[in-house]
Amino acid sequence: MSSALHYTLLILLLAVALSSAAAQAKPKAFLYFIKKDPEALQYSTTLEFSTQVNFVDVVLDLGGEHTWFDCDSYDLPTYKPISCGTTKCNNVKSNGCIGCNLPPKPGCTNNTCGVSSYNPFTNDLYAQGLGEINLFSTETNGLAVGELHKLPKPFPFSCADSDLLRGLSNATKGMTGLANTVTSLHSQWSSKFKLPHKFALCLPSTSELNPGHMFIGGGPYYFPPYTKNIATQLLTTKLVINPVSTAPIYTEGDHSDEYFIDVTSISVDNRPVSVNASLLSIDMNGYGGTKFTTVTPYTKLETSIYKALVGDFKKAASLRKMKRVASVAPFSACFRASSVATSQTGPVVPYIDIGLAGNQHWRFYGANSMVSLKKDVLCLAFVDGGSKPRTSVVIGGHQMENYLIEFDLVSSKLVISTSLLFRNTTCQQFRVL
Ligand SMILES: *[C@@H]1O[C@H](CO)[C@@H](O)[C@H](O)[C@H]1NC(C)=O
Ligand SMILES: *[C@@H]1O[C@H](CO)[C@@H](O)[C@H](O)[C@H]1NC(C)=O
Ligand SMILES: *[C@@H]1O[C@H](CO)[C@@H](O)[C@H](O)[C@H]1NC(C)=O
Ligand SMILES: *[C@@H]1O[C@H](CO)[C@@H](O)[C@H](O)[C@H]1NC(C)=O
């Protein structure tokens, strides 16, 4: 019996030694695959909460504050509720203490730290108890996929009611938040592995073949057939703070945790579109400005900006002999596809430039500015965001696709790599060895 005990101890010691050896090779970055739902026009990823087959598909919400999903379909042996009044609870934006009168299960516990779970598609907001589970992800060196790692401390999220799933892509069971909060997916991996707080999105444009990618922890980023870091041909601009929160629920004085940039101009085929400049900056009430979102498929522009852009685009298109056809809602500039040539950067149409500080231009070619609808119909893929929207320019998924966009929260800047477009490669070509 005593030798059996020794034997067990020895194995335990070996296991400890092995795991501390493994811990020395600190991962450089983590990788999440991104799928596109071509019907819902949403992007999703998979969260793994055990090394076995236990995972949930969740919609990516760049402006979302934390992660929530419907726990009922999952076995969550490592689930623990976070109690009210604890340090963990005080570190998140808790909105009170939650109880539950049903038999206890994940998502139904008493004295639990309350957070809000928000569905931006239906605008539904629920107060839910914050819990935590073990979470796993694969490391990457930018070139290939490496080992699976466990997040050193459990991952905070909330179990949501299945009602909250309305409007989400069919295969998904919740949403994961990527805003600049302590509970967001990238904050958790970066802080718990002491990696630089950076994450990069490379959204896929189709649902076919390979997925797109999200990197957490920084570059390099390699996309075959190129053997170099594709983070070249970079546009760099400051992330700006909107002084007034854009979250569905917030405390007065909170600033927004979404990602805003300063756009200085918009132009079509090098001619400036006439835009009321005050709409491009953020006023003291938090109105105006430009932000990024993954939950709006097409960029939304304040009405006067939208009308000016569409008008200028139609003029430039007619100079290029593009044939107009009846518009298809919600778009208002549609063309006969057969009157438009195609190239490596998509349909050859007037290009749209978004001006950034330092005389930089983020240029949208046909692949990002046009959407192919019915047979032979190609429409300008921007929509009217209304006349007094909270944010004047909301850059949506279609315009972000196949750019590698890094959100660098260490130096508070946004870095856009435009090189994929010109290299006959896409966000879906990352090498998985
Ligand atoms: C989801 O599935 C339902 C029922 O099968 C179907 O009616 C709906 O169109 C699907 N929605 C999407 C976005 O794929
Ligand atoms: C929460 O507390 C109430 C009142 O004490 C009790 O009836 C209920 O069963 C508890 N719920 C859970 C999930 O423990
Ligand atoms: C420009 O936009 C601001 C903010 O919405 C508004 O107050 C102002 O009247 C607009 N100016 C013009 C010339 O339309
Ligand atoms: C991309 O493909 C096009 C057409 O196949 C070709 O003309 C072009 O040279 C290629 N570009 C690069 C950078 O390989």
Image (cartoon, helix red, strand yellow):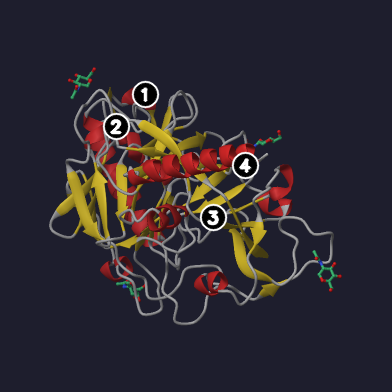
Find ligand 2 in the image and state its quadrant.
bottom right
Residue 7 on image: x %, y %: 57, 37
Q: In which quadrant will I find the N terminus? A: top right
- Residue 143: mark in rendering: 2
Q: Nearer the viewer, residue 266 or 66?
A: 66
The response on whether ligand 4 sits within 8 Å of label 1 is no
Which one is closest to the eye, mark 1 or mark 4?
4
Tag 2: residue type?
Leu
Q: Residue at x 59, y 60 (%)?
A: 118
Left or right of 163 on screen, residue 14: left
Task: Give the mark, 3 or 4, whose residue is nearer the N terminus.
Answer: 4
State how far apart marks 3 and 4 are (Cα).
34 Å
Q: Helix or strand or loop: what does disc 1 sit on?
A: loop
Helix, strand or loop at mark 3:
strand
Name the residue type under label 1. Leu
Mark before the other along the chain sequence, 2 or 4: 4
| Of callouts 3 and 2, the N-terminal one | 2
Residue 231 is left or right of residue 120, and the answer is: left
Residue under numbered circle 1: 433
Q: Give the quarter of the figure containing the C terminus.
A: top left
Farthest residue toward the bottom? 252
Disc 2 within 8 angstroms of ligand 4 (CB): no
Q: Amino acid at mark 4?
A: Leu
Q: Earlier in the sequence, mark 1 or mark 3?
A: 3
Q: Earlier in the sequence, mark 1 or mark 4?
A: 4
